[in-house]
Image (cartoon, rainbow, N blue to C red):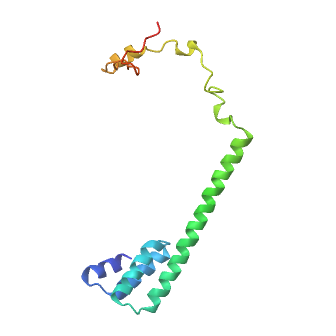
Amino acid sequence: REECNKALEIDLKVKAYFRRATAYFQVHDHESAKADYEKVLELEPENKAAKNQIVICDQKLKQFREKEKHIYAGMFNKFAERDSRHPYSGYEDGLESIGEWHNEMADGMMTLQQECEAFGETMPEPKTNNHGRKHQEDD
């Protein structure tokens, strides 16, 4: 492939593009191979070998995409099946549900005001309701 690149720097030769495309194909870089075979056709529109190789590249790319689709579908199906059997398996060390909260959980935490001061920020201004009055703070 390196030699083909050097040859192309010197002169845009059909043979160099074809050889580089073949090198790409051998390492399963079918997109790059197809691009080079298409360049061969630009320079030499009747090149049957390049036309055939483009068809083969398209087939390989399609096979790759199908295989990839099945792999990902299998992964998602596997995880979905596992989650359906054990819906809370990811929460063993945490809360069982979002609603499970106790005030003791906040013991030792900074207030919002202290946290803002620690980061050099200020508390946002209270929002107003639809009537232009500030919301009442619960004390």
Looking at the image, residue 72 sits to the left or right of residue 106; the answer is right
The correct choice, above or below, for 95 with respect to 2 in the image is: above
Residue placed at 66% from the left, 30% from the top?
92
Question: In the image shown, does 122 or 104 lie closer to the viewer?
Answer: 122
* Quarter of image, res 103: top right
Question: Residue 109 at x, y = what percent?
Answer: 47, 15
The correct choice, above or below, for 59 with respect to 71 in the image is: below
The correct choice, above or below, for 110 with respect to 56 in the image is: above
The residue sitting at the right extreme is 85
Quadrant holding the N terminus: bottom left
The residue sitting at the left extreme is 10
Question: Residue 138 at x, y = what percent?
Answer: 47, 9
Residue placed at 34% from the left, 20% from the top?
124
Question: Residue 78 at x, y = what percent?
Answer: 68, 50
The correct choice, above or below, for 35 with respect to 109 in the image is: below
Looking at the image, residue 77 sits to the left or right of residue 7; the answer is right
Question: Residue 17 at x, y = what percent?
Answer: 37, 82
Residue placed at 43% from the left, 11% from the top?
136
* Quarter of image, res 97: top right
The residue sitting at the front extreme is 131
* Quarter of image, res 134: top left
